[in-house]
Image (tube, rainbow, N blue to C red):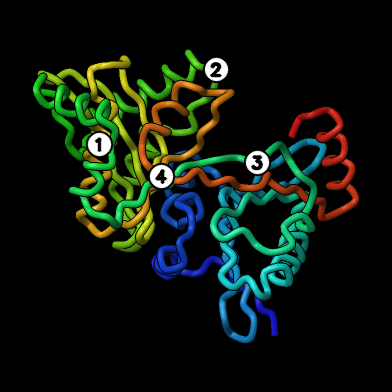
Amino acid sequence: MWKIIENEPSEVWDERLATFGGHPLQSALWGDARAKAEGNPHERLLVEHDGRTVLQARIEARHHKLAGKIAWIPQGPLYLYSEIAFAAHLQLKAALKARGYQVYFEDPRDPIPPRYREHGVCIGGPSQTMIVDLSVGPEALWRELSANWRNEIRGALKKGICVREVDDDESISRFVAVCAALGKTKGFRFQGSAELVSHLLRERNSPQVTAKLYAASLAGEFLGGLFVFIVGASMQNIWNVVVRSGGGSNRLLQWTAMKAASDAKVTRYDLGGIDPIVNPGVYKFKRALTGPVVTFPPIRGAALSLRGGIALAAARALRKV
């Protein structure tokens, strides 16, 4: 009845991910690009029931001197059929244990599987994002923007600020450099690199799974960029940065990406994480757009062995996870 399939062809994997609305970080494109750019090992597992795929998980292998081999499933797995989601989850855990993993962490998005509390222990707290409805079309989208947003966009255009889709080495390098600099200023580590962004922009497994980088400039000067990932009918905000606040470039970047996606029949735009406490400026900026706030439950972690159990308990006691 149950079957585990390893490393399905990338194009088939990404087509299914697009059909069922999976997250970009679960795409073969993302995993392959990270492997090429950074050497991060990953594998893809399908769980089938009676010949039907019910779960797919792209797993990143991590290693820890105490815990051993750790499975991290970013923004996943993707549970395709809720009626047997928990049973499929148990099959996945057994498959990971057989492959030598000691601990695993999962963080599925839409849809959240039933009985999620039984998938492991809670790591951290819930997270939030905001979804913009792009299906209404560009004209309705423009009307739904606040007056402040529309005025800022008009002002940016009058100044001569230009936003265009790019994939050249110079634009990628500038974007990554500004993102890394912002990370140092804000106290976080930027999780990208020029090589990773290049692979994501220039390689493709499926026409439904694509990455795009928009760059804002004025008289040849780089002002900021927006990196988005489209999977099927959904666009995800991955990274966005501006050299300095004000001037309308950030809003013009967002508007350009939303309009292009809406024209391409993409129906939803996930703005990424919002947190009014940790990052109130970003929260205020994103909440100015029209869309519902969606709350996701915490990451779940589970031990797959005695060694994994000891390591996970110690990490939780020391608040290291």
The residue beneath circle 2 is: 187
Amino acid bearing label 3: Pro
Amino acid bearing label 2: Gly
Disc 1 or 3, which lies upstream in sequence?
3
Q: Position of residue 237 (x, y in %)?
A: 39, 41
Relative to 152, say whether 253 is above or below.
below
Return the mark for residue 214: 1
Q: Residues within 10 Å of mark 3 (few under 14, many from 20)?
A: few
Return the mark for residue 291: 4
Relative to 291, say whether 156 is above or below.
above
Amino acid bearing label 4: Gly
Q: Position of residue 210 (x, y in %)?
A: 32, 53
Callout 2: SS: loop
Amino acid bearing label 1: Tyr
- Marks 2 and 1, how far apart at CA: 25 Å
Task: Judge from the rendering whether residue 307 lies leftward or rightward of residue 20; answer left or right.
Answer: right
Callout 3: SS: loop
Tell me if label 1 and label 3 are in contact, CB under 8 Å: no
Tell me if label 3 and label 4 are in contact, CB under 8 Å: no
The residue beneath circle 3 is: 126
Disc 2 or 1, which lies upstream in sequence?
2
Q: Residues within 10 Å of mark 4 (few under 14, many from 20)?
A: some
Which residue: 36% across, 37% down? 289
Which residue: 68% across, 74% down? 84
Looking at the rendered image, the disc whose residue lies closer to the viewer, 4 or 1, is 4
Residue 290, quarter of picture: top left
Q: Position of residue 264 (x, y in %)?
A: 22, 57
Q: Position of residue 299 (x, y in %)?
A: 68, 45
Q: Count numbered badges in the picture.
A: 4
